[in-house]
Image (cartoon, grey):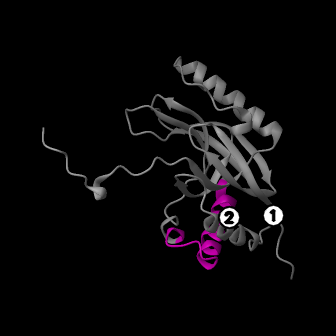
Amino acid sequence: MPEQLWLPGLEAPPTPTDGLFFAVFPDVNTAATISKLAQELCADTRVRSKPLAANRLHVTLLHLGNFAGGLPPDKVDAAIRAAASIHMAPFTVGFDAVASFGSKPRPGPLVLTGGEGVVGLHALHDALVHALQHAGFGERAGSIATSYVPHVTLAYGMPWAAERPVESACWNVREFALIHSLLGRTRHVALARWPLAAAES
């Protein structure tokens, strides 16, 4: 049997092990309310999908990438510098609909979405994108400025369903965090948190 040629350019890329993103989290009471809704929605569909635990519910502000073999220190440092430069007053968010993020008719994530109630999240997202570009995060700082849809993931592998209204879930956003996601291990570790406060005049 002839030997196979070794083509370094065709080798499979390493599997990502670590993710990095900015997020905000609901307060304990709101998280419990959202968790209860997720449980009810999962029960209504009669599928095996499990709702996310209350302590894992969050809104991703900005996903900074997935990496193999640990987080790049330079990316973490740039993200921290960018976050430290943010000056924004606390604001209220409200999510008042559930929608599928999968491609019809395939199963996918079921999420909470909002209309006017998520304007503050858009503003914080845009401020972070701008700050990252000035903090030397790299080329990805420009590519992450794509369309942003604030949402709270309730469960994965849910049947596709049209968007429909639900009782609004609201809370006051008083801080945001930089999160290290241990991919495949359902663990999120907060690397740092920043309180929201308006710039002093």
Q: Residues within 10 Å of mark 2 (few under 14, many from 20)?
A: many
User: From the viewer's perspective, is residue 109 above or below residue 47?
Assistant: below
Q: Residue at x 67, y 59 (%)?
A: 121
Marking on residue 171: none
- Quarter holding the N terminus is top left
Q: Residue at x 66, y 45 (%)?
A: 95
Marking on residue 196: 1
Alpha carbons under labels 2 and 1: distance apart:
10 Å
Of mark 2 and mark 1, the one earlier in the sequence is 2
Q: Residue at x 86, y 82 (%)?
A: 201
Q: Residue at x 87, y 79 (%)?
A: 200
Residue type at mark 2 is: Leu
Left or right: where 52 falls relative to 65: right
> Looking at the magenta stretch, what is its main secondary structure?
helix
Q: Position of residue 136 (x, y in %)?
A: 60, 76
Residue type at mark 1 is: Leu
| Quarter of the rendering containing residue 27 | top right
Q: Are marks 2 and 1 in contact (CB under 8 Å)?
A: yes
Q: Position of residue 142 (x, y in %)?
A: 50, 71
Q: In the depicted view, which residue is nearer to us: 163 or 195?
A: 195
